[in-house]
Image: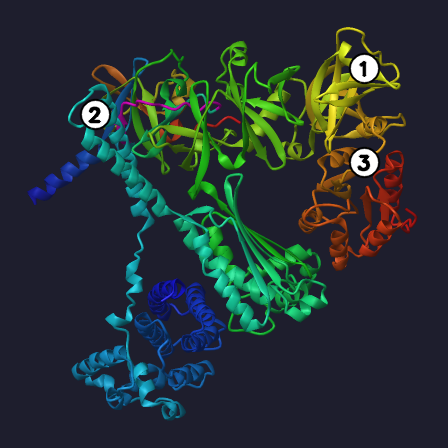
Amino acid sequence: MLQTAQTAAVARHEASTQSFVTFEVAGQLFGVPVMKVQDILTPDAIAPVPGGPAEVRGLINLRGRIVTVIDLRKRLGLRYEGERKGMCVTVENEGESYTLFVDGVGDVVTLQSDAREDSPTTLDPLWKELSDGVFRVDGRLLLILDVGRLLAIRSKQ
Amino acid sequence: MDDLLQEFLTETNESLATLDVELVRFEREPRDAKILGNIFRLMHTIKGTCGFLGLPRLESVAHAGENVLGKFRDGELEVTPGAVTLILKAIDRIRQILGAMEQTGAEPEGDDSALKAELNAMAAGEAAPQAAAEPEAQPAFQSPSLDDEGGFPVAAELLAEIAEALDKDPSLATPAPAVPEAKKAETPKAAVAEAAPPSAAGESSAAQSSIRVNVDVIENLMTLISELVLTRNQLLQLQRVQKGNEFKVPLQRLSHITSDLQDGVTRMRMQPIGNAWAKLPRIVRDLAVETKKRIELVMLGADTELDRQVLEIIKDPLTHMVRNSADHGIESVADRLAAGKPEAGTITLKAYHESGHIFIRISDDGKGLNVEAIRRKAIASGLVTEPELATMSEQQIIQFIFRAGFSTAEKVTSVSGRGVGMDVVRTNIERIGGAIEMSSVAGQGTTFLIKIPLTLAIVSALIVEASGQRFAIPQINVTELVGVSDRSEVSIQRINTAPVLRLRDRLLPLVSLRGLLNVAEDEEKAARTTNYVVVAQVGSAKFGIIVDRVFDTEEIVVKPVAPILRGTPFYAGNTILGDGSVILILDPNGIAQAAKQQTADDGRADVHANAQDAIKDETSFLLFSTRGNELKAVPLELVARLEDLDATSIEHVGGRHVVQYRDHLMPLVPFDDLHEWPTSGKQAVLVFSDHGRSMGLAVDEVVDIVRDRMAIELSSERTGVLGSAIIAGKATDIVNIGHYLTLAFSNWFDGAIEAQFTAQRRALVVDDSAFFRNLIVPQLRAAKWNVTSAVNGADALRIMEAEKPFDIVISDIEMPEMGGLDFAQAVRRDSRFQALPMIALSSHANADDVEQGRAAGFNDYLSKADQPRLAENLARAMEAASHGRQWRNAS
């Protein structure tokens, strides 16, 4: 009886928390749901795609699979500042893998779902469209990104 | 045992295993037409193959089984457990015969009449349910047969097993009321065969010499190997840095093994299409013998490699289609002779890569599909109503053969004609993202074109570099490589901003890969260094791609680009090279179009509203100016070279200007009377060449090259001008080069020429000389014809089948492959083309030639030599055609 109650409590606890992989782009902390993330890597050779969408940094060979690298800085409408070192967070969306090129990858954080707040109304419209709420983590704002919307890049003709 | 038989055994064993499973499913879901269709097809295939291999016993059992299945399918027979058991029994019998064949290589002797009688009785709806429900009825006959030494050892073994089984379960031995006549007919020996159930020995060992591996397993293996290659490369890199360590030798060995492993797995997936064709010659031969026809099978491109998975899927459809062609398409020798065709019919199989796909063409020169029969059948089977049918074209009607259960064979032969086939073929091909098209011409044959995406296939690609990045260009699109520098014989020139290459007799439009992909550096610097031009061919258009470096060719596995990159037109896919790097595969088609777009963006050419139309109708023009400062245009295709001649090199001989050019005297013709020959400096000359002769047209200045639609506004009365057109937004005269050629050489048109036209009023020009086509097509367009051209008679026939009807055909006489006379005869044999106006156009036009032409079916015969009157004669003949007037008879 007691055990059942405990299990239920654990289940409730699990249901009410969410884990996110966090990373930084231009000093801002972002997160994507841990379930969406397949891989974190430091890319060595990125083959550019001339003529492709600006957000596409290139292609990498991820263990025999070709994965498209999305430059998150560009995707977020930030200025591109020359060659940067960075890391890649590989996410899966609708059966296709993409990897997000970010400045650096942080911890995996587990947060209470009810601590999630709506994105501030003053947020840049582009960011607002891509975000899926914010959390406060250690005095910083963690902006959660919606992977589906993030990858909805219209390829230019 | 020959390979064919071996393959048959393996394949049939697989089919049988599937049949067992499917039948059991079917018993549970007797209404599922899909399962039944599948079962029927498998049984049909077994029957068909047995027929070709000369295995009468197997064939007869399968045939009887198929009859019953056919009744199920037509709903004439209820699906009962008993009936299914009977079918299973037939399958067991087949399996058992196969088992014996495995040992001896030949069909064992035996009699299956009891089983067949049961099946036939079932098909006729007479079988007592119990009879069918007791498939093991025959054990009653076993005992005597056990003593029969004349049997074959396998059967004896089997019988021993049965005896054992019977001991355990005596109920099996209960004699059943089998069909009495059949019982009588049976000999003891036959009973041996009859009684043997499937057993371990019956599973042929051939089935075990090859195994099937799930593609996922291979894919997974492939991924792992790619990773292994990368790791190997890293190790090699480390080892290069630390010279002379003890890892060197084992590392090299690891390296080799890794390469071999990679090769092996890649090869595991790929097979030449010829593998799927290997048994076709025999099938066709046997079929020819059986039907007393003469059939030639021509196979082209057998080494085209296909992904194994794709190959498996298209193998059966291909066999079916070839079988259909041989059985229904090709006529009997007598019929062929009566139709004026060669005795032997030809079935041609051709496989090739094109524009990112693999194409397989199966064509026969038989009688074509019987549209009338298809029409009747379509109505009879309720697929379509009569009024609906009335609105359909023949091409639409013949597509009904792709519907399930559709067969027009007048009699059901053992070969084909049970309505199995085309629907299955289509389903299989579409399942792998392919498409099938068909065209058929009564009396001339049927052609199927199967298109399979390249996504699964391996291609040979040329690796090039531009601005430090490597790209792959499919080898299939590359016709040649040209190294160019300031000092080399060929060099890149600019006409206005458009780069062109003078290559032999043609000016080739160029596209800079660097510029196109916007990876441009300093243009000046780029121009100074040595470049390479990859000459690419897309359809009939040739252009050059300027690259910085050219590496090797490599076999690459094409993978589609990610969805977000699919809007970028330059890429056909991407791949991983042997060294682990990711590389983009260029799509020459996309590049050609993008290059055009770029030209438009430069603001010179105006709108290219419809890119598709643009490809078809656009022509490159060379613009030049004359004394009067007017702009004139000539199709770039016609211009062989541009020369700036030293005024001093121009000689004046006998009232004509000539220049010593490439060891010959080349006549120079001024554009008009206003032309002033310079006494010093340079003279711009457009060089035109054909059949080894050249002439130069002296102009003031070459201005530009533009691409635009050939829309000639009005025909001009002025000599030497075809008409005027809006080119790049300006009214420009289109020059009639023919006029200047006759000024230079009175006998210019003696050369063999071939041209074809099609138009609004559509004209088809058949001529093997590109030069003449380029000359005559603009003239016809000026006269508001929509013109299509073909390079010989065979090409023309193909075009006539594939496209909308033409209003007129203009054909050369002397052409390779199929000349004008044969062509005309072929056209006239087709009932649809009886009234089609045809004009012959030849350098030889004496009375005999004209008579021959007329006998072959030409309405009129014009001489190419008569250049001044050619346009006029053509115009008159074509005018008559468009008004359906009586054809002019004088030449």
Q: Is residue B802 left or right of residue A71?
A: right
State how far apart marks 3 and 2 are (Cα).
84 Å
- The chain letter for the residue carrying disc 2 is A
Residue highlighted by disc 1: B651
Q: Is residue A49 left or right of residue A31?
A: right
Residue highlighted by disc 2: A109
| Residue A146 visible to the viewer | no
The one nearer the camera, B291 or B710, is B291
Q: Give the mark toward the camera: 2 or 1.
A: 1
State how far apart marks 2 and 1 are (Cα).
89 Å
- Considering the whole magenta stretch, tell me its main secondary structure: loop
Pointer 1 with pointer 3, Cβ within 8 A: no
Count numbered badges in the picture: 3
Q: Residues within 10 Å of mark 2 (few under 14, many from 20)?
A: some
Tag shown at residue B749: 3
Question: Is residue A45 found inside the magenta-colored segment of the image?
Answer: yes
Q: Position of residue B54 (x, y in %)?
A: 45, 73
The residues colored magenta run: A38-51
> Closer to the N terminus: mark 1 or mark 3?
1
In the picture, residue B327 is in which quadrant?
bottom right
Q: Residue at x 71, y 65 (%)?
A: B339
Secondary structure type for disc 1:
strand
